[in-house]
């Protein structure tokens, strides 16, 4: 049997399974045959190939890791000192718990959640598990008593940080930074409150190094009240 080619084995395997399941019943003998025969042969013909290493040195990923860890550290906080202290404490706890062992990414996520005292799965899922991309859009800007309410849609589904660049009638600008924490409650839509006693002439979303896939819907102008393409 082990002299079969991979395609021949797959055909043989399909035939065995079809014969066993033909009468829609599986007795003990058939179940045992399937487990013993296919269990041994599957390891010979269907064993997954070892993954090929793409990088030989962790230093090759230093820049990418630094960027992601920075976003992670600032996922839901604005106070820089508090961020550094909380992140350092979580990393120390992770090292203490898993030194000389074999942790998985989920062990890292659970440790961070535990030490932070909050559920950050919304962040882990988007940045490490999901296949979302960065594409934010301004859906509307409404004047409120203390400033403006800015509605932002997360079209791509990635919980990305973003800066709101405000422009005023005298030509001056002001930047309001928002962390990925704005997407914790609702990963698709959020409303950001901008406090100002000055009228806005325009507003633009700026992701900085986190490039937006579609910049045409990242701006709003007071003249039309609509998004303006860049």
Image: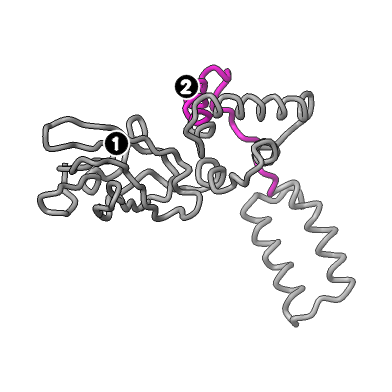
Structural crowding at the residue carrying mark 2, measured as other residues with C-alpha within 10 Å and reported as few (<14), some (14–19) or many (≥20) = few
Q: Residue at x 30, y 39 (%)?
A: 164
Q: Quadrant of residue 108?
A: top right
Kindly report the distance in space between the C-alpha atoms of the residues bearing marks 1 and 2: 21 Å
Query: With respect to residue 21, does 117 lie above or below?
Result: above
Callout 1: SS: strand
Q: Residue 157, position in %: x, y?
A: 42, 50
Q: Residue 4, position in %: x, y?
A: 70, 51
Left or right, residue 87 beside residue 42: left
Callout 2: SS: helix
Question: Is 164 contained in the magenta span?
Answer: no
Q: Which residue is mark 2?
A: 63
Q: Quadrant of residue 159?
A: top left
Viewer-nearest residue: 82 or 125: 82
Q: Which disc number belongs to residue 206?
A: 1
Structural crowding at the residue carrying mark 1, measured as other residues with C-alpha within 10 Å and reported as few (<14), some (14–19) or many (≥20) = many
């Amino acid at each position: 049997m082990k002299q079969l080619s991979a395609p021949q084995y797959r055909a043989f395997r399909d035939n065995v399974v079809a014969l066993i399941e033909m009468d829609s019943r599986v007795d003990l003998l058939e179940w045992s045959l399937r487990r013993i025969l296919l269990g041994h042969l599957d390891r010979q013909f269907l064993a997954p190939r070892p993954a090929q290493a793409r990088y030989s040195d962790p230093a090759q990923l230093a820049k990418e890791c630094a960027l992601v860890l920075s976003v992670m550290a600032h996922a839901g906080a604005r106070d820089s000192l508090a961020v550094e202290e909380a992140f350092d404490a979580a990393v120390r706890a992770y090292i203490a718990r898993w030194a000389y062992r074999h942790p998985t990414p989920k062990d890292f996520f659970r440790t961070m959640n535990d030490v932070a005292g909050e559920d950050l799965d919304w962040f882990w899922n988007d940045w490490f598990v999901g296949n979302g991309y960065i594409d934010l859009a301004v859906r509307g800007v409404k004047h409120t008593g203390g400033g403006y309410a800015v509605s932002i849609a997360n079209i791509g589904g990635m919980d990305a940080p973003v800066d709101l660049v405000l422009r005023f009638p005298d030509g001056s600008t002001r930047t309001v930074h928002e962390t990925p924490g704005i997407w914790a409650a609702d990963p698709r839509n959020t409303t950001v409150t901008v406090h100002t006693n000055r009228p806005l002439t325009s507003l633009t979303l700026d992701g900085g190094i986190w490039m937006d896939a579609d910049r045409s819907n990242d701006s709003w102008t007071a003249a039309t009240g609509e998004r303006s393409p860049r």
